Image (spheres, grey):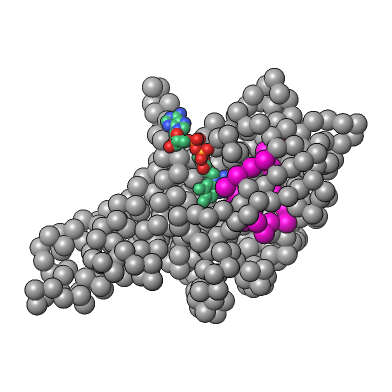
Amino acid sequence: MKRAIYDEDHEAFRASVKEFVDRSVTPHAEEHLEAKGLPRDFWLEAGKQGLLGLEVPEQYGGMGAGDYRFNAVLTEELSKVNASLPSCVGIHSDIVAPYLVELTTEEQRQRWLPGVASGELLTAIGMTEPSGGSDLAALKTTAVRDGDQWVLSGSKTFITNGYSADLVVVAARTSPEKKAKGITLFGVSTSLPGFSRGRKLDKVGQPESDTAELFFEDLRLTDDDVVGELDQGFIHMMQNLPQERLNCAVSNLAHAKQILAETIVYAQERKAFGQGIGSFQHNKFLLAELVTQIDVTQSFVDECVLAHTRAELTPIDAAKAKWWTSQVQNDVLDHCVQLHGGYGFMNEYRVARAWKDARVSKIWAGSNEIMKELIGRDLGL
Ligand SMILES: Cc1cc2nc3c(=O)[nH]c(=O)nc-3n(C[C@H](O)[C@H](O)[C@H](O)COP(=O)(O)OP(=O)(O)OC[C@H]3O[C@@H](n4cnc5c(N)ncnc54)[C@H](O)[C@@H]3O)c2cc1C
């Protein structure tokens, strides 16, 4: 089905992203795998190409696109390469950038945004802690007032870009007695004394992304490092999570769609009993079901992208898009592995890596159970 959400400008941007991927990503895919992360050259190249500053206003060096469809195009193209790439880039430019654009003072914008757009200031966001991620309101990291400073203590885990980030938006408890209404966001420079990181975490999938545990030991901050309103951090996160979940939905679907397209070619070429394996009725019907699932899901995700472009996407629709696409992605990729037979279980095959990479999409950015909890609550249950 022809998709109607993109115009010529979006397609021209897509062509420039593809050109970037061919030039700066594909030739280095093996290096990214071995390094378990993306080198700074990658970020600087992406910044030069204008891919990191879609959310950043032009006066701070960004593109100031003001149209979420450009973010979606970028996510789709990166997701065709692997699932790590849209995750790392997405955290920086689609998830952290809105906090730094919308909640900051003029001084903070001047301090942070040019580097965000150029790739010189790599960002991450630290919400999850070793003691839990789903119950964000229960987080334990504290920022305690000491004179005109804040003293940050605690730790975060599973932080995407955490090993390389220069700036981490950290959620910390500033009013212990207030639970959700006592959390504040801080922009924490990783060069400050009291900041340290653990090793790169050894994940089941997405080896190209760096994921780390972060530690804050009596790390001193000032009021100039507060992002948004004091004690309003939980609300700020709730306001920004729909965009994060939409980013996941776009990525989940584009990744699954790409691997399914490659699997259809495989099913045409791979022979058993003297015929292409795709021509057996079981597999033909299965592939028909999978492309239908993808196409029908695409319509919903496109509607969400359009709604978000108009600033009308509800947290509930974002939650639906996030859990549904991650389930579809996992189901589709599991069938793709099966259709590849033994090769589907070999790490050197893209389908095997994609299958492992996809598993986390049901866990992160708010697990699928939490998404259903939100949707259920909205039903009055
Ligand atoms: C690769 C990776 C990258 C990540 N990147 C980041 C990042 O950049 N920044 C960041 O802050 N976090 C990040 N996360 C953390 C991620 O968002 C959390 O793992 C996720 O929110 C779940 O939290 P948890 O792991 O503590 O699980 P828990 O909260 O301990 O949950 C465990 C299980 O219990 C279920 N559960 C919990 N509460 C309920 C409930 N009320 N009803 C039903 N079931 C429930 C969950 O769904 C889950 O299945 C990342 C995680 C991974 C694996």
272, above or below 202, in the image: below
* The residue stretch that appears in magenta: 155-172
Q: Main secondary structure of the magenta part?
A: strand
Q: Residue at x 55, y 35 (%)?
A: 132
Figure quadrant of the C terminus: top left
Using the rendered image of the protein, determine whether residue 374 is visible from the camera's viewpoint: no
Q: Residue at x 79, y 54 (%)?
A: 191
161, above or below 171, in the image: below
Q: Residue at x 31, y 64 (%)?
A: 345
The stretch drawn in magenta includes residue 11:
no
Figure quadrant of the N terminus: bottom left
Of 17 and 281, the residue lying toward us: 281
- Residue found at the very far top of the displayed protein: 177
The quarter of the picture where residue 171 lies is top right
104 sits to left or right of 69: right
Residue 29, percent across and down? 51, 73
Of 368 and 224, the residue lying toward us: 368
Q: Residue at x 65, y 61 (%)?
A: 53
